[in-house]
Image (tube, grey):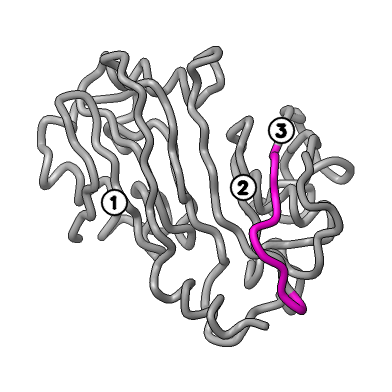
Amino acid sequence: MELNVIYEDKNFLVLNKPAGVVVHPDKNHDENTLVQGVVKKFPEIRGVGDDPTRPGIVHRLDKDTSGLMIVARNQKSFEYLKSLFSGKGGKDGIKKTYLVLVSGSVKDGEGVIDLPIGRSRKDSRRRIAGRGASGKLRGAITEYKIVKRFEKFTLLEACLITGRTHQIRAHFAAISRPVACDKIYGGKNPACPAGLARQFLHAWKLEFVSPSGAKMSFEADLPDELEKVLGELR
């Protein structure tokens, strides 16, 4: 697969991942993954990390989520960046901001969702925020503010204070505002604007201090298909 590399230095890469691409091989996907593309273009990354199936990977995006990802190019940078994503980076941790279209009207102009997340008792693919979760619950906080209101949907900026699996999707489903066209969290008939074929979730901005100590900020514009959806909403 072709990589959209928007930044590279000796320590890390910043990629713009398209929707539909799996980050690393698993039991259901073993070809055309992001990791395979990374290793092909940057073979030195093959031995970086703590899992040979995920070389250089310090965080993930779901298959149908687009946007920014960081990949470490050496072990020292891997450990440093992993600590940022695990919330151990202190005041100089990483700030991750997404653009997300949710179903329905969000009442307040901005807010915070502070609900612990655990696994679903009924569906192994899902995470549950609050009641109904099984196993160990992990604290999860999402801050959001409204970008634009539509008749049946709301466009938000969502900032992850923590980084749990499916955090944005589970949190907004928990407040009855699931991500538009989310086939796992949106119920049997998820609300989908015309022309949208995947969940409307895009990793838009990353801000952090690099392994060399420089303050870094990156943005990835919405993909054309998501811009088109917004242009047709009222």
Give the quadrant of the C terminus: bottom right
Residue at the image point whose x is 76% and y is 32% from the top: 135
As drawn, 220 above or below 72: below
* Residues shaded magenta: 142-152
Q: Is residue 52 above or below residue 39?
A: above
Q: Is residue 201 left or right of residue 210?
A: right
Could you tell me how far apart the alpha carbons at marks 3 and 1 are, in whole angstroms?
27 Å
Distance from disc 2 to disc 1, alpha carbons, whole Å, reads 19 Å
* Mark identifier at residue 81: none
Task: Check residue 34 in the rendering and tell me which mark sits there, or answer none.
Answer: 1
Q: Foreground: 152 or 136?
A: 152
Q: Which residue is mark 2?
A: 166
The N terminus: image quadrant: bottom left
Badge 3 amino acid:
Ala
**Label 2 or label 1, whichever comes before in sequence order:** 1
Say if mark 3 contacts mark 1, CB within 8 Å.
no
In this view, the residue in front, 97 or 72, is 97
| Residue 140, disc | 3
Q: Amino acid at mark 1?
A: Leu
Which quadrant of the figure has residue 159? top right
